[in-house]
Amino acid sequence: MYAVICDPGDRSALWAVDRLRARLGEVRLVAMDLFGLGGALHWQLEAGAAPSASLRLPDGGELDTRGCRAVLNRAQAFPRVSGGDADAAYVREELAAISLAFLAAFGARIFNRPDPLHPGGRLLSTAAWRRLAARAGLPAATVALGDAAAPTPRVAQRSLVIGETVLAAEPAIAGLSRSLAALSGHSILGLGFSAEGALCEATALPDLSWGGEAAADALAELLEGAR
């Protein structure tokens, strides 16, 4: 069994679920809010063993880190908690911590891997992305701060990194995109480039449908090869 964790309105995730089911069989769709007060979550840590966790789903099924082969992680935020008082803030922080522990229990079988600051993966500023782009050998659009801030260049071409597969029109862009994904620690990454080939957009939550059936094939290969 495989799983896709996402927000209910994530159309790209729903697109991926349909295609992954055709390629892999059972794929459970899990809303991130189930990690909140609406779901029954169990997390266990024993001496000498890796952490394990399970989540009871509304249909009576279960998402268990030991029985799930791999996860496509499209989480956009930690579970929501209404209210603005101190109690709500405390509950929000506790739910974020237990959600992160659950996602981390999948180890290397979750793509992208969660980050302490965001459940869907490592967040980077525009300046940080462009610094990594320079390290990867990509020209990067200038970053200006304050009153001197300039508009972001228009995206003229895109690439989509899914594991070892890179979907891009230009072979040179494909190789550099793979290098940037490795430097940033993302297994799945969407990139946008200006007409001059400079990086001007990067996201760990790309529109997967942009890559069509080739992207679906790459996702299936990434999940199926998880260890």
Image (tube, rainbow, N blue to C red):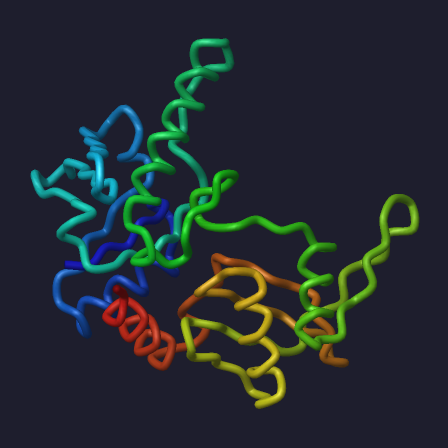
Q: Residue at x 17, y 45 (%)?
A: 63
The C terminus - image quarter: bottom left
**Residue located 37% across and 59% down the image:** 111
Q: Is 87 situated above or below 162?
A: above
Which residue is found at the position 58% from the left and 74% from the top? 179
123 sits to left or right of 1: right
Up-down relation of residue 152 to residue 60 (above or below): below
Residue at image coords 43%, 10%: 87
Q: Residue furthest front?
A: 48
The mark tally for this picture is 0
Task: Provide residue 214's location: percent of width, then percent of height.
Answer: 36, 81
Quadrant of the frame with the N terminus:
bottom left
Q: Nearer the viewer, residue 112 or 18?
A: 112
Toward the left, the furthest residue is 60
- Using residue 126 as the reference point, say whether residue 169 is left or right of it: left
In the foreground, 59 or 227:
227
Q: Vertically, is 88 above or below 165?
A: above
Residue 75: x and y in percent read 40, 47
Rendered location of residue 196, percent (x, y): 76, 80
Q: Nearer the viewer, residue 119 or 67?
A: 67
Q: In the image, 191: left or right of 24?
A: right
Return the x and y of residue 88 as percentages of the image width and height. 43, 14
Name which quarter of the figure residue 92 lies in. Answer: top left
Return the residue found at the far bottom.
171
Of residues 201 and 221, which is closer to you in this image?
A: 221
| Residue ranking furthest to the right | 148
